[in-house]
DNA sequence: AAATTAATGTCGCAC
DNA sequence: GTGCGACGTTAATTT
C-alpha cells in the first residue's frame, strides 16, 4: 500500500486498476484477463451493437457502458433508462478480440441460442475489479407480505373468513389463499401488492372457473380480489363476473 | 490530445477521467461535478443500500457497481444477475455527500415518493464521462412484426380470413386484429410473439366476451390465439372456452 | 427443461 | 397524469 498523503491508501500493483484511453489491444488484454479471473468488467466507449437470438436487433454508433459480470451476464447501457439497451443473461460466455484495430466483445449462450456483439470504434476506459457480495436483499411490501397479513388476520377479508390452504393447486394454476366464508362457501382469494387492472380479474376468474370444475360445485364458489385499489375497468369486469373486491395494502399504513 | 506513441490518443485534461481509490471527499467532488454537468457516473466499492418507496429494502455490506445516468436513473449492480439489486427510475434527482468520512449517494423522486441511499465504506474507483447516443435500437421479431405478417397474408390464419381493423377498441381493451371469416362471422385475433400460457387465453377470452356484449351478438364471435406454440394448459383452456389456436412465428423461418 | 406467476417490474402509447 | 398491454421481459419456484 502507498500512502498518498491525503489520509487514504492506494492499492498495490496486484489489484486491477482502471485503464484510461487504452489501445484496442491493451483493452482486449485487460478484459480477457479479468473475464478469465472472474472479475467484473466495465468498458465505456463509442460502439455499435448487434444481437441475434429470441429476437434480433442492431444499434448504430454511440457512447455506451458495457458491464460484464463474473456470472456471465452482459449489459449494454446507454445514457437513458433503467433497462439496458442490449444484454445477455447470466450463464453466457464472453469473448474478446481485436479485429481491424477495433475491440470486439462477444457474448454467447445456448438454450435458446443467443449472441451479442459489441464493436468499439473508441474506448474511453476499461475497469476490472474483483467482486465479493455475500449479502441477500431484504425486501418488504411484497405479495408474500400481503398474504401473511391476511393469514394473521383473516377478518381483513371479511368477518368469519377462514383460510384453509395457500397455493392450493387447480387445473388453471395455484390459488393464493383458498378458504371458506362464514356460511361454509368456498372462497378463492387472489392477492396483488398493487393497484389491479383487468388482467388480475381474468386471473381470478380462471381460478374460480377451474375450482368449480374441480369441485363439481355449481357456483357455490366465491372469488375475492385483494389489492390496494382497482381501476374502473377492473371493477366493471369484477361485477360482470360476479366477483368481489377487498381493498388492502401489503403492509399496514403508518 | 497527447500521442502516446502506440497509435492512439490520450484525452486532454478537460476530459473527465477515472479516479482510482479516491478519498470519500475526492469521490464526492468528482460525482457531484459530473451529476451537475449531466455526465454518466460509475462508482465501485463496498457499500450498504437502503430503499423506501413502493416497497422497502435493506442490503448489507458488499461490493457493488453504482451507475448514475444523466436522465436521473440510478442502478446498483451486484456480481450477479441481469437485474440491478436496487435502482431508481429515470427522472430521479441524485445527491452526494460525505458523512462520518463515508461517501453517501442519495436518489429521490416523487410520484410515487421513492428514496434510495447508498453508503460506501470504501471506494475502489469513480468514473465520470460525457455520453452522446443519438441512435435508436432497431428490433426485429416483435409482436408488431407478427401483426404485419398476418396482415400481409391473412390466409396464414385461415383461408378466407379478412382483417377489418387493428387495435379495435372494446370495453375490455384493444383487439390486435379484428376481422371476419369466410362465413362473415366476427373473428378476434390475439397475437403473441412467443409460446403462450393460460394468461394469454384469459386475455383473448376477455376480448371475445367484451366484443359479444359490445355487438350484442350471441356467440357468433370467434376467438383465435396466434403464437408460435402453446402450453398444454393453455390448449385445455382454449378448448373449454371454445377458442382456437393458430401456430405462427413472428418472422418466417429461414 | 418446461410451466406458471410475481415484480419497487420497465417502457411506450393512448386518453 | 392514469390505464393498459408488450417485453429478447427477468427471477423464483415447482414439477
Image (cartoon, coloured by chain):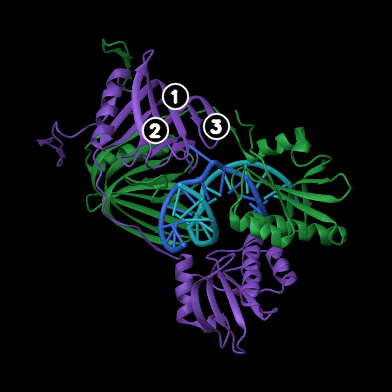
Chain colours: A purple, B green, C cyan, D blue
Q: CA distance from mark 2 to mark 1?
A: 10 Å
Kindly identify which chain the residue marked by label 1 belongs to.
Answer: A
Kindly identify which chain the residue marked by label 3 belongs to.
Answer: A
Left or right of B228 in this view: B32? left
Give the secondary structure at mark 3. strand
Q: Which residue is tagged 3?
A: A56
* Between discs 3 and 1, the one toward the N terminus: 1
Left or right of A147 in this view: B142? right
Q: Which residue is tagged 2?
A: A66
Along the viewing direction, whichever of B135 and B232 lies nearer the viewer: B232
Give the secondary structure at mark 2. strand
Along the viewing direction, whichever of A245 and A63 lies nearer the viewer: A245
* Between discs 2 and 3, the one toward the N terminus: 3
- Depth check, mark 2 against mark 3: the one in front is 3
Asked whether the viewer can see residue A253, the reply is no
Q: Residue at x 46, y 60 (%)?
A: B53
Quarter occupied by residue B208: bottom right
Give the secondary structure at mark 1. strand
Q: Which residue is tagged 1?
A: A47
Left or right of A114 in this view: B236? right
**Does label 1 lie on the same chain as label 3?**
yes
Labelled pair 2, 1 in contact (Cβ < 8 Å): yes
Labelled pair 2, 3 in contact (Cβ < 8 Å): no
Q: Residue B123: x and y, percent? A: 24, 43
Amino acid at each position: 500500500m502507498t500512502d498518498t498523503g491525503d489520509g487514504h491508501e492506494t492499492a498495490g500493483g496486484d489489484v486491477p486498476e482502471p485503464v484510461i484511453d487504452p489501445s484496442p489491444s491493451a483493452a482486449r488484454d485487460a478484459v480477457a484477463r479479468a473475464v478469465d479471473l472472474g472479475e467484473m468488467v466495465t468498458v465505456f466507449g463509442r460502439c455499435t451493437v448487434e444481437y441475434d437470438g429470441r429476437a434480433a436487433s442492431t444499434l448504430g454508433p454511440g457512447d455506451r457502458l458495457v458491464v460484464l459480470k463474473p456470472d456471465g451476464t452482459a449489459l449494454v447501457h446507454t445514457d437513458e433508462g433503467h433497462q439496458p439497451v442490449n444484454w445477455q443473461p447470466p450463464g453466457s460466455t464472453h469473448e474478446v478480440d481485436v479485429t481491424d484495430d477495433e475491440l470486439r466483445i462477444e457474448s454467447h449462450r445456448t438454450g435458446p441460442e443467443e449472441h451479442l456483439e459489441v464493436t468499439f470504434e473508441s474506448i474511453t476506459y476499461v475497469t476490472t475489479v474483483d467482486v465479493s457480495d455475500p449479502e441477500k436483499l431484504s425486501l418488504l411490501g411484497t405479495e408474500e407480505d400481503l398474504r401473511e397479513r391476511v393469514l394473521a388476520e383473516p377478518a381483513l377479508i371479511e368477518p368469519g373468513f377462514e383460510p384453509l390452504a395457500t397455493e392450493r393447486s387447480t387445473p388453471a394454476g395455484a390459488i393464493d389463499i383458498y378458504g371458506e366464508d362464514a356460511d361454509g362457501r368456498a372462497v378463492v382469494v387472489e392477492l396483488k401488492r398493487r393497484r389491479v387492472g383487468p388482467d388480475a380479474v381474468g386471473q381470478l376468474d380462471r381460478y374460480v372457473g377451474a375450482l368449480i370444475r374441480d369441485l363439481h360445485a355449481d357456483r357455490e364458489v366465491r372469488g375475492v380480489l385483494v389489492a390496494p385499489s382497482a381501476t374502473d375497468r377492473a371493477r366493471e369486469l369484477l361485477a360482470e363476473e360476479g366477483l368481489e373486491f377487498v381493498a388492502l395494502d401489503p403492509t399496514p399504513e403508518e
